[in-house]
Image (cartoon, rainbow, N blue to C red):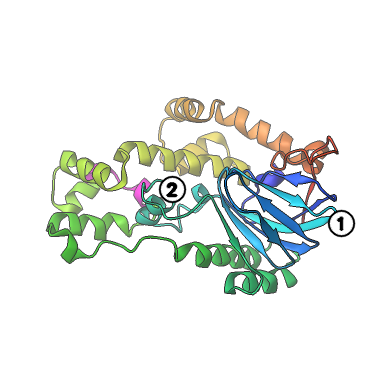
């Protein structure tokens, strides 16, 4: 689905007075390329959005972008799906971004054109005309710089007072999620010189989810990405995702996503090639007064 594509710069034009609800499953960064608009949110002051101003939206925020009555509003935006960054994000960073109860990020952050993030976004869009690797890396860096300042500082060893927990944070917290999905519980427990039960307890206390549940989620997200980005056989996708039994892989995938791997791939393929899916993204909502979805256009 074009509106949910990961690290692809897209354009959205709202007719005068039209509204757009920026909903997505990850993080969305948008800037005003042309025109004037407003960010409207219940129980909050309205924010005017001029050229170069923008938004950072975390998942499904409650609020709308409205175009001025005087003319159309052109936005440039991209989406970051953290589940596709399991080879980049560490386990600790995933926890801070996704599940930490003290996550300091508001659902929506507005930035001005003159701020460093606004200036960088503008310079970046001036030179982006494809979805090549350097472009995607530049978008990822822009997002990472934007969110890094809002992440809580890691707990220092002296503050913990527990050598085993300090070792755990050093070993597991700085491990990428891809690495975590490849190691067995036994291997990690042996590296920490503790029992599997004790390791599992430390993991749950530190990250709020059971170790095996997180590992299964990482493997299934990896499988879904492989199904979308390659033509590999289902059994090869299962092996690449850490499953050695095809029946178990199919059952776990269907339990998580509601479709078998084959069904999910076929559905995703139909959406990616359907003209209606490309011209009417599911991400935007109906603008006021038009009765039709606002189309997205990849740059």
Q: Position of residue 186 (x, y in %)?
A: 22, 43
Q: Earlier in the sequence, mark 1 or mark 2?
A: 1
Where residue 70 is drawn, which disc sits there? 1
Residue 184 drawn in magenta: yes
Q: Which residues are magenta?
A: 179-186
Cα distance in 3D space between marks 1 and 2: 39 Å
Q: Nearer the viewer, residue 92 or 243?
A: 92
- Nearer the camera: disc 1 or disc 2: 1
Image quadrant where one finds the C terminus? bottom right
Mark 2 sits on what residue?
A: 98
Q: Residue at x 20, y 41 (%)?
A: 201
Q: Residue at x 74, y 72 (%)?
A: 126
Q: Position of residue 20 (x, y in %)?
A: 72, 45
Q: Nearer the viewer, residue 285 or 5?
A: 285
**In the image: residue 119, left or right of residue 221:** right
Q: Residue at x 14, y 55 (%)?
A: 164
Q: Position of residue 127 (x, y in %)?
A: 73, 72
Q: Position of residue 161 (x, y in %)?
A: 12, 60
């Amino acid at each position: 689905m074009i509106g949910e594509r990961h690290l692809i710069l897209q354009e959205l034009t709202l007719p005068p007075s039209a509204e757009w609800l920026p909903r997505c499953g990850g993080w969305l960064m948008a800037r005003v390329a042309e025109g004037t608009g407003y960010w409207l949110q219940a129980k909050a002051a309205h924010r005017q959005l001029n050229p170069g101003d923008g938004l950072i939206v975390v998942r499904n925020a409650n609020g709308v972008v409205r175009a001025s009555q005087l003319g159309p509003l052109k936005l440039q935006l991209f989406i970051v799906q953290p589940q596709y960054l399991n080879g980049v994000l560490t386990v600790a960073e995933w926890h801070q971004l996704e599940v930490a109860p003290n996550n300091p990020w508001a659902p929506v952050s507005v930035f001005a054109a003159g701020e460093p993030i606004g200036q960088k976004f503008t310079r970046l869009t001036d030179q982006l005309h494809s979805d090549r690797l350097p472009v995607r890396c530049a978008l990822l860096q822009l997002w990472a710089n934007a969110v890094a300042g809002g992440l809580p500082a890691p707990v220092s060893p002296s503050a913990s007072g527990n050598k085993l927990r300090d070792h755990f944070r050093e070993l597991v917290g700085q491990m990428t999620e891809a690495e975590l999905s490849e190691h067995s519980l036994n291997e990690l427990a042996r590296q920490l010189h503790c029992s599997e039960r004790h390791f599992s307890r430390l993991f749950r206390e530190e990250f709020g989810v059971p170790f095996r549940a997180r590992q299964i989620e990482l493997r299934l997200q990896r499988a879904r990405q492989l199904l979308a980005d390659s033509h590999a056989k289902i059994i090869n996708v299962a092996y690449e995702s850490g499953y050695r039994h095809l029946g178990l892989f199919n059952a776990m995938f269907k339990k998580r996503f509601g479709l078998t791997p084959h069904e999910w791939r076929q559905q995703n393929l139909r959406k990616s090639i359907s003209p209606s899916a490309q011209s009417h993204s599911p991400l935007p909502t109906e603008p006021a007064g038009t009765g039709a979805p606002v189309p997205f256009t990849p740059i």
